[in-house]
């Protein structure tokens, strides 16, 4: 018997029928795929660069994470004074960051069950700083700015240790930005005043971002961890295969659809790229896509996960705190509902690009007989969607906390009736079933806590930045500068804001990026007449696309590592594929009908239709193809028509339709003429 059949107890053909991930598909064994995936995650996703624990140490660390998740839920139901509960929450995050993340990627620091002495000291200093605050919060509140010398130094230590924890869990760039803001604050106020504002008030480290993290984000992160245990990610990939796998360039379309669906759960650009990309990228390469294009497709699609309702990225939860609309109660349901159309247009744009690329290169799909059939698959596993459906319903009718908890309970209930041998597997270390027993329940709580660390510590440092902006008046100065530079023109202000978001987002995670932009640039756009929800969506989008915009494009680089392609070429291709992400924000800012503000159903339908046609036209221009190669002159014409269709206005729509329609008609006639000849 061949070695492969000895190992997997099946022939490659039989294994492929069940999994669509066989050795003969990718030229790699499942173990090699698993090893490569882990290596890519550790390189590009700091959440994966963690210490290694085994034996009793592993059980103790596991218990710490589980208790942290339970404590976060406890605070939601039995809250104390806001400074006390938030300080305790951040203090535990800082402690667990040092438990989980080594100082560098040096392999020597990742020895099994090993924490260096200096990390223990930092851990103790951070714990003492926050613990002192928690125990003495009433005294500190009553005294206000009159801090003792001990409290000043404990505050300084707490701030520095928090910055170091953020460097480990998130990266150096955000720490550099926050440090620059702190240095500026020191030129404006005394050390005592700055320490009080940054560490001891509800406007600094324990400010609005941490409030959103504690009240909303933690619960949704835990829900995502439980939902993942039901096997819904694999179901999404199978579903995408059944819908688009057999079409022209099918694997790329599968990547777009599955990443959109998986993004609803994960909300992580790099994590989603690596998880689904380990399956879709090799499939795309085998179909005939160039490696840099295959990696770019997955990176661009996975980045859209942060804008895909109902869960979206962590920054979306912060919008609830920052967005204000007249005569409207802004909750997460309000935000998620208005994110649907922009997200749909984003993914539609990528889908169009991969379709044209496939047609241009004559790429085929996966043989239909090797794919799952949609209806049998949906009837057998469709109930896995029930937690997401329940989440959406409760977001619209109840509180966010109730929605997250109810959906989590339903995810556990769903898993109780589901035992599966899957068609598509992502992890070869998991067992075959998805039933959430006690062990998986603990796993979900642990994974939820680990995912919370990076978001939580980023929120804490974002609070530092927001505090400096509001207490020093630098925000007002920036507003005046941007308004002056724009000359009062909305389009110029939008362009300057876009550049700021992208440059800042190259090193600052989305959460902190959004907080900075929400407190500086969003007010500029609002002052210029753009509705609050549209202004905040604008800065949110451009903070996210930094993950695929060179020179620092972590999602694109992760995709390139899996595809074995040039990182820079992958980043350039991802930017081109995600052209919709650079256009949709302008649409919703200039015409808020996209986010259902001051509009009618007819206006929404018209703007969606014209935007879709416009993006298809831009895709034609960028690919240089529609039913044949497009000459340079026609590419310019169709690009101009696409932009006119995207820009709101009846006149521009008519001109745009005429230009795009003319190019399409010309290509169709030329194709027929060539066929007759």
Image: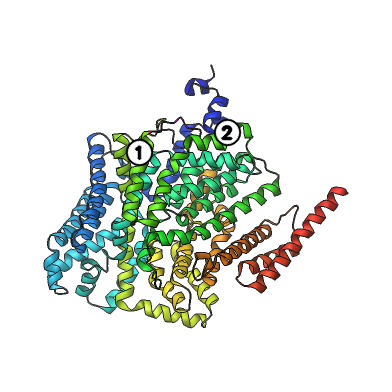
Q: Position of residue 286 (x, y in %)?
A: 61, 38
Q: Is residue 314 above or below residue 70?
A: below
Callout 1 secondary element: helix
Q: Main secondary structure of the magenta part?
A: loop
Residue at horizontal 80 percent and vertical 52 percent from the top: 671
Q: Which of 254/205 is in front?
A: 254
Query: Real-space Cα distance between discs 1 and 2?
Result: 36 Å
Residue 447 drawn at (x, y percent): 33, 44
**Quarter of the rendering containing residue 460:** bottom left
Residue 573 showing in the rendered view = no
Query: From the viewer's perspective, is residue 177 above or below residue 52?
Result: below
Left or right of 583 in this view: 504: left
Which span of residues is magenta-colored?
Answer: 417-430
Query: CB under 8 Å between callouts 1 and 2?
Result: no
Relative to the observer, which residue lies in front, 88 or 558? Answer: 88
Please state which of residues 269 and 291 is positioned toward the viewer in this rendering: 269
Q: Quadrant of residue 514?
A: bottom left
Judging by the rendered image, the residue that carries numbered circle 1 is 413
Q: Is residue 426 magenta?
A: yes
Mark 1 or 2, which is nearer the eye? 1
**Residue visible at 36% across and 44% down?**
225
For label 2, the SS is helix
Q: Which mark is residue 25?
A: 2
275 left or right of 370? left
Q: Quadrant of residue 653?
A: bottom right
Q: Is residue 345 visible?
A: yes
Q: Tell me residue 265's x, y (percent).
A: 42, 48
């Amino acid at each position: 018997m061949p070695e492969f059949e000895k190992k997997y107890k099946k022939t490659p053909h039989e294994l492929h029928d069940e999994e669509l991930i066989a050795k003969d598909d990718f030229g790699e064994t499942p173990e090699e795929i698993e090893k490569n995936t882990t290596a890519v995650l550790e390189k590009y996703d700091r959440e994966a660069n963690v210490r290694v624990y085994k034996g009793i140490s592993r059980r103790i660390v596991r218990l710490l994470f589980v208790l942290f998740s339970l404590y976060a839920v406890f605070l939601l139901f039995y809250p104390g004074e806001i400074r006390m509960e938030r300080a305790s929450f951040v203090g535990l995050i800082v402690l667990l960051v040092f438990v989980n993340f080594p100082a560098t990627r040096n392999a020597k620091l990742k020895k099994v069950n090993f924490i260096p002495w200096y990390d223990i000291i930092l851990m103790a200093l951070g714990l003492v700083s926050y613990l002192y605050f928690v125990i003495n919060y009433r005294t500190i509140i009553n005294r206000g700015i009159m801090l003792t010398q001990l409290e000043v130094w404990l505050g300084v230590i707490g701030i520095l240790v928090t910055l170091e924890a953020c460097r480990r869990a998130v990266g150096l760039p955000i720490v550099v930005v926050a440090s620059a803001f702190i240095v500026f604050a020191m030129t404006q106020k005394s050390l005592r005043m700055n320490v009080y504002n940054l560490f001891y008030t509800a406007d600094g480290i324990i400010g609005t971002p941490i409030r959103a993290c504690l009240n909303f984000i933690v619960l949704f992160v835990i829900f995502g961890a439980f939902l993942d245990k039901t096997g819904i990610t694999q179901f999404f990939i199978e579903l995408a295969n059944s819908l688009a796998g057999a079409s022209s360039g099918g694997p790329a379309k599968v990547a777009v659809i599955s990443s959109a669906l998986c993004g609803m759960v994960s909300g992580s650009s790099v994590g989603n790229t690596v998880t689904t990309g380990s399956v879709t990228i090799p499939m795309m390469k085998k179909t005939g896509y160039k490696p840099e294009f295959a990696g770019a497709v997955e990176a661009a699609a996975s980045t859209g996960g942060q804008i895909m309702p109902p869960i979206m990225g962590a920054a979306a939860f912060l919008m609830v705190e920052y967005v204000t609309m007249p005569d409207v109660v802004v909750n997460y349901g309000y935000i998620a509902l208005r994110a649907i159309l922009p997200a749909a247009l984003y993914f539609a744009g990528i889908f169009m690009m991969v379709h044209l690329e496939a047609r241009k290169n004559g790429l085929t799909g996966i043989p239909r007989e090797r794919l799952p059939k949609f209806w049998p698959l949906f009837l057998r596993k469709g109930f896995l969607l029930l937690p997401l459906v329940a989440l959406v319903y409760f977001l619209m009718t109840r509180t966010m906390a109730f929605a997250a908890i109810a959906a989590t309970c339903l995810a556990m209930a769903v898993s109780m009736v589901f035992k599966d041998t899957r068609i598509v597997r992502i992890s070869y270390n998991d067992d075959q079933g998805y039933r959430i027993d006690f062990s998986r329940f603990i796993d979900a709580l642990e994974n939820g806590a680990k995912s919370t660390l990076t978001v939580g510590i980023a929120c804490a440092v974002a609070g530092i930045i927001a505090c400096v902006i509001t207490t020093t008046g630098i925000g007002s100065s920036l507003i005046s500068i941007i308004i002056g530079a724009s000359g009062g023109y909305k389009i110029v202000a939008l362009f300057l804001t876009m550049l700021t978001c992208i440059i800042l987002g190259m090193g600052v995670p989305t959460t902190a990026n959004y907080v900075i932009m929400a407190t500086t640039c969003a007010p500029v756009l609002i002052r210029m007449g753009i509705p609050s929800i549209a202004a905040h969506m604008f800065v949110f989008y451009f903070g996210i696309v930094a993950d695929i915009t060179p020179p620092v494009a972590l999602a694109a680089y992760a995709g390139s590592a899996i595809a074995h392609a040039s990182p820079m070429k992958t980043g350039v291709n991802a930017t081109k594929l995600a052209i919709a992400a650079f256009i949709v924000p302008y649409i919703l800012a200039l015409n808020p009908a996209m986010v259902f503000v001051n509009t009618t159903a007819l206006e929404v339908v018209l703007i969606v239709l014209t935007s879709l046609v416009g993006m298809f036209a831009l895709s034609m221009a960028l690919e240089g193809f529609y039913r044949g190669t497009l000459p340079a002159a026609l590419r310019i014409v169709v690009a101009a028509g696409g932009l006119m269709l995207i820009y709101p206005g009846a006149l521009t729509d008519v001109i745009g339709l005429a230009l795009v329609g003319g190019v399409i008609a010309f290509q169709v006639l030329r194709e027929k003429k060539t066929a007759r000849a």
